[in-house]
Amino acid sequence: MKRSHKNHNETTRMELKYCEHCGSLWLRESGAERVYCDQCLPEVKELPVPKKRPGRVMLPVGSSPLVEDYRVESDTEEVEFEAAGGVA
């Protein structure tokens, strides 16, 4: 008796990725951790290894300006502004 093997159509999921070195778009296998395109990979491998991992980025926190107390001092009571010529 002859056994036949069924042909299985294997599909590979791909995802669109941008190169984190040059910014070009390329396709990589879904779930892969590569972040550089084939053209940049040899160039990036030659870069020195960072001494320490970058820490968490935090925005500086300072006192906020007091906008509600903003006053315009003028010799006249009314302050007039000229139009800049734009379209509103």
Image (tube, rainbow, N blue to C red):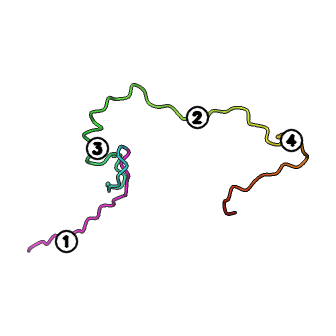
Residue at point 36%, 58% (across, down): 15
Which corner quadrant of the image does residue 49 belong to?
A: top left
Q: Start and end of the magenta stretch?
A: 1-20
- Which of labels 4 and 1 is toward the front? 4
In this rendering, is residue 38 above or below 59? below
Residue at point 90%, 45% (across, down): 76
Going by the numbered disc 3, the residue's amino acid type is Cys
Q: Is residue 71 left or right of residue 60?
A: right
Q: Is residue 83 left or right of residue 4?
A: right
Instruction: State which tag comes first along the sequence, 1 or 2.
Output: 1
Instruction: State which tag comes first along the sequence, 4 or 3.
Output: 3
CA gap between label 4 and label 1 equals: 89 Å
- Which of labels 3 and 1 is toward the front? 3
Answer few, some or many: residues within 10 Å of disc 4's Cα (few below 14, many 20 plus, some between 14 and 19).
few
| Majority secondary structure in the magenta region | loop
In the image, residue 50 lies in the stretch drawn in magenta: no
For numbered disc 3, what is the local secondary structure?
loop
x and y percentages locating residue 56 in the rendered image: 53, 34
The residue wearing badge 1 is 6
Cβ–Cβ under 8 Å for marks 4 and 2: no
- Which of labels 3 and 2 is toward the front? 3
For numbered disc 1, what is the local secondary structure?
loop
- Find residue 40 and name its label: 3
- Furthest toward the top, the residue is 51
The residue wearing badge 4 is 74
For numbered disc 4, what is the local secondary structure?
loop
The residue wearing badge 2 is 58
In the image, residue 13 lies in the stretch drawn in magenta: yes
In this view, the residue in front, 9 or 40, is 40
CA gap between label 4 and label 3 equals: 60 Å
Residue at point 60%, 35% (across, down): 59
